[in-house]
Image: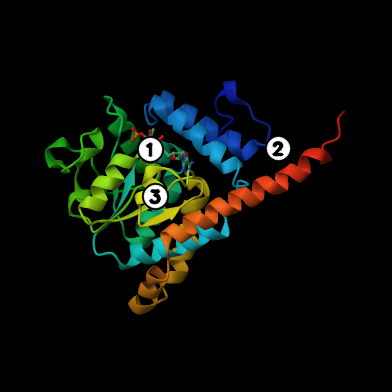
Amino acid sequence: MNPNENQDYIVPKSHPRYESLKFRHKIIEGMKKLVVAEAGLIAHGRGECFDYILGEKTTQAAKKAIEAAVAALLLAEKPVISVNGNVAALIPDKLVILSNTVNAPLEINLFYQKGGRIEAIKNILQKAGATEIYGTDPKKMIELKGLESNRRKVELIAQADLVMVPLEDGDRTEALKRLNKTVITVDLNPLSRTALWADITIVDNIVRTIPEMIKVAKELKKLNNLQLENIVKNFDNKKNIRKTLNLISEYIDKQKEKVFDIVEI
Ligand code: PTJ
């Protein structure tokens, strides 16, 4: 979607925060088209805040988690990528490419149930080139045990050995873990329940993570299973989250010095 499509949102490319504003407007447009839940705007704002204090870049810790996540996806027998409104609005094309590259089907799974949302998300994914989209037919859905939210209604996820749940709320991650599934998440908040419960937590903005995962997948596909297993075995999620928290502290410390560099006009 061209961010300048809607005359309300003309953002000059020269704007120092063009990239950030472009994705903010994708979320707003997504909400108008029912793709994004109203609460998705708030979730995005929270994400922006964490992204800011991470320096708006994919950190070394995130790169390590991305490598482990891709290796785990390639090793999984029945992997599924769960898609919610925010993810579909922000990065549909790349999501479809990742799904095809690692052979992990896309399943729409929403926290906020509202008539028309599943259709709107299905449309956006189909426009992006998806041919098989799960989680759209109520007759094929079953309910996950130990979960009360709307996310309990799943299709392929019920049988999956690995589920990637980007921008997730904590309840389902806990439920998936209790069902012995490997969970990968992408969450800019390193302290969220999902981040702490997941097996592999990528603390990064989904708009940078998915393209990076596609790049890494192309490389890791050249490895054998033993090499992929070693990557997963050598990854320590708790240590990696701690490293991310240290990177945030270091980044904030650096910014303290910068405060005095701003010259008043
Ligand atoms: O489309 P639905 O109905 O399934 O609802 C989706 C949302 C995101 C509204 C729902 O899952 C929700 O309320 O999520 P939470 O509990 O707000 O958690 C979302 C997490 O994603 C928060 O920790 C945010 O910091 C994080 N986040 C937001 N935007 C991004 C992000 N993480 C990575 N990349 C982002 N762009």
Of callouts 2 and 1, which one flags the residue occurring earlier in the amino acid sequence?
2
Mark 1 residue element: helix
Q: Position of residue 182 (x, y in %)?
A: 29, 58
Q: Position of residue 105 (x, y in %)?
A: 29, 53
Indicate left or right for 257 with 58 as reference: right
Task: Kindly report which numbered mark, 2 or 1, lies closer to the viewer in this rendering.
Answer: 2
Point out which mark residue 16 bears.
Answer: 2
Of callouts 3 and 2, which one flags the residue occurring earlier in the amino acid sequence?
2
Tell which of 88 and 53 is nearer to you: 53
Amino acid at pointer 1: Ile
Amino acid at pointer 2: Pro
* Dot 2 and dot 1 residues touching (CB under 8 Å): no
- What residue is disc 1 on? 124
Q: Position of residue 138 (x, y in %)?
A: 16, 36
Mark 3 residue element: helix
Quadrant showing the C terminus: top right
| Quadrant housing residue 136 | top left
Q: CA distance from mark 3 to mark 1?
A: 31 Å
Residue visible at 40% across and 42% down in the picture: 167
Q: CA distance from mark 3 to mark 2?
A: 33 Å
Mark 2 residue element: loop
Amino acid at pointer 3: Leu
The relative height of residue 232 versus residue 55 in the rendered view (above or below) is: below
